[in-house]
């Protein structure tokens, strides 16, 4: 039966032990939720029982669901102004699953090489499964990101812990070695992530200030073009328009300079 082929976290043996064709089991939201819950609450048991083969379909679907959920949370938070991204955060509902799917394959390739250098006997598919199920933390991280910089810290620290757990439970590497290797990489990633978030927030604040200045110039343009009788004075309007255009050029140069300063070297 198809239901017998589905792997759930509660199972003590993988579906491959009873039927190698577990990819035919289809999508089951309940299974995805159960898997995500155990990755969050008991990652050691999850990775210990995780099938090391069975195709890319099931873990990829898991990644897409987690990406969609995290994107939806981020989008809702952006609407009420809690993420600092404004309405642009709504695009995460569509972009997140796509970007996360692509990123999961790239991340798995990097970790596959590292695990191979550490002596792991497993193939790329196993590495991908380890990475894919680790995305269970992203919806939680999306909520935590309300607090500046905390989301970056939680995502990095939690992600490193899951990779260390997968290294010991799936790849059979010693905890001491895994902690040393991925701990160092985690610190580097954390510093890079915090630096990037700081630059992004600085840029958003500068762009917001420029937008306010432009709005003020529009309002002043309307007032400066009026005569004493409240009617439009062509001469005053011409002078006001010239001053407005000059201010717009200065604002444009300032915004361009801010963008160049925000670009990583």
Image (tube, helix red, strand yellow):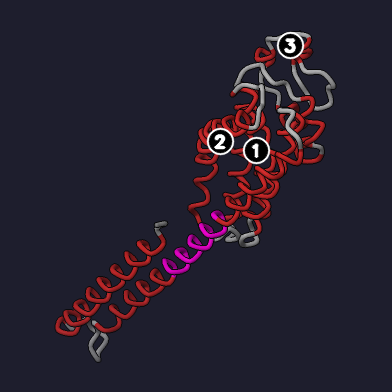
Q: Pointer 3: residues within 10 angstroms few (<14), some, or many (20+)?
A: few
What predominant SS class does the magenta segment belong to? Answer: helix
Q: Cβ–Cβ below 8 Å for labels 2 and 3? A: no
> In what element is the residue under mark 1?
helix
Q: Which residue is mark 1?
A: 135
Q: Residue at x 60, y 21 (%)?
A: 56
- How much space separates mark 2 and mark 1, taking CA atoms? 11 Å
Mark 2 neighbour density, 10 Å: few (under 14) some (14–19) many (20 or more): some
Q: CA distance from mark 2 to mark 3?
A: 31 Å
Looking at the picture, how far across and down is residue 151, in whole percent? 64, 54
Q: Which residues are magenta?
A: 192-208
Q: Is residue 91 above or below residue 232?
A: above
The residue that disc 2 covers is 107
| Residue 111 placement: quadrant | top right
Quarter of the figure that contains the N terminus? top right
Is 246 on the left or on the right of 145, as rendered?
left
Secondary structure at badge 3 equals: helix
Distance CA(mark 1)–CA(mark 3): 26 Å
């Amino acid at each position: 039966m198809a239901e017998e082929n589905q792997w759930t976290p509660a199972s003590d043996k993988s579906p491959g032990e009873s039927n190698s064709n577990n990819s035919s089991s289809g999508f089951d939201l309940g299974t995805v939720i159960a898997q995500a819950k155990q990755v969050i609450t008991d990652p050691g048991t999850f990775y210990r029982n995780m099938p090391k083969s069975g195709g890319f379909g099931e873990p990829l679907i898991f990644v897409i669901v987690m990406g969609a959920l995290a994107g939806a949370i981020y989008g809702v938070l952006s609407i009420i102004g809690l993420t600092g991204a404004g309405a642009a955060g709504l695009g995460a509902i569509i972009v997140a699953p796509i970007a996360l799917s692509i990123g999961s394959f790239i991340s798995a390739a990097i970790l596959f090489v590292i695990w191979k250098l550490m002596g792991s006997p497993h193939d790329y598919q196993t590495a991908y499964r380890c990475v894919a199920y680790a995305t269970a933390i992203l919806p939680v991280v999306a909520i935590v990101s309300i607090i500046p910089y905390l989301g970056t810290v939680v995502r990095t620290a939690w992600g490193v812990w899951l990779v260390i757990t997968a290294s010991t439970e799936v790849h059979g590497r010693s905890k001491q070695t895994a902690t040393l290797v991925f701990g160092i990489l985690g610190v580097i990633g954390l510093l890079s992530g915090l630096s990037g978030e700081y630059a992004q927030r600085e840029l958003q604040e500068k762009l917001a200030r420029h937008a306010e200045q432009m709005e003020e110039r529009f309002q002043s343009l309307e007032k400066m073009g009026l005569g004493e009788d409240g009617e439009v004075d062509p001469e005053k309007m011409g002078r006001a328009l010239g001053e407005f255009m000059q201010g717009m050029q200065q604002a444009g140069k300032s915004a361009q300079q801010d963008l160049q300063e925000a670009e990583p070297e």
